[in-house]
Amino acid sequence: MAAIKASIGNEQYRIEIKSPTGNLVIADEPIEKGGQDKGFSPKELLVSALGACTCATLRMYADHKGWDLESVDAAIELIEETGQTKFVRKLQLTGKLDEVQRARLLAVANACPVHKILTHSIAIETVLV
């Protein structure tokens, strides 16, 4: 289970996000939305989770297989259309990979844990404490 704590004080739109292990990320809104652009926006954080998970999953898989994957670059765009939210993920795989390996890595990217979360039914339960 992944868990975080997010909090905001009096500084407008600056949010501290803390992990149970002590890692800290600052989120903020862009200047044009009243923030100070001191960190990723909430939507950028969402897209970043998919990018980070994709890259890590592909690295782990290629390492396990002993494949010559030098690097993975993921460019992901969040597009919000009427009635649909779409993630466009473009992957650049660098290394000595044949077409079968490249095709397998594409399938692995589509099975990364965050991809699975985002493509399955999601329920959000909110309670006041």
Image (spheres, rainbow, N blue to C red):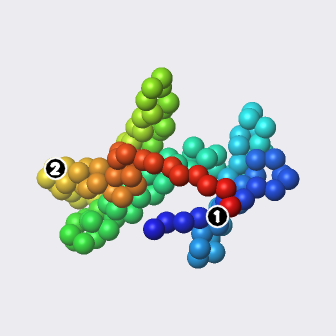
Q: CA distance from mark 1 to mark 2?
A: 43 Å
Report the residue at 25% width, 50% height from top: 106
Seen in the image, is 58 located left or right of residue 13? left
Label 1: which secondary element: strand
User: Residue 17: image x %, image y %?
Assistant: 66, 61
Identity, as a three-letter code, of the amino acid under mark 1: Lys
Residue positioned most to the left: 100
- 67 relative to 116, above or below: below
| Mark 1 or 2: the one toward you | 1
Report the residue at 26% width, 65% height from top: 62
User: Residue 13: image x %, image y %?
Assistant: 76, 47
Q: Nearer the viewer, residue 50 or 1?
A: 1
Label 2: which secondary element: helix
Count of all numbered marks drawn on residues in the image? 2
Seen in the image, is 35 located left or right of residue 109? right
Residue positioned most to the top: 82
In the rendered structure, find residue 99 and report the number of the disc placed on it.
2
User: Residue 3: image x %, image y %?
Assistant: 54, 66
Identity, as a three-letter code, of the amino acid under mark 2: Glu
Question: Callout 2: 10 Å neighbours few (<14), some, many (20+)?
Answer: few
Q: Nearer the viewer, residue 45 or 55?
A: 45
Q: Which residue is mark 1?
A: 5
User: Residue 78: image x %, image y %?
Assistant: 49, 37
Seen in the image, is 29 located left or right of residue 77? right
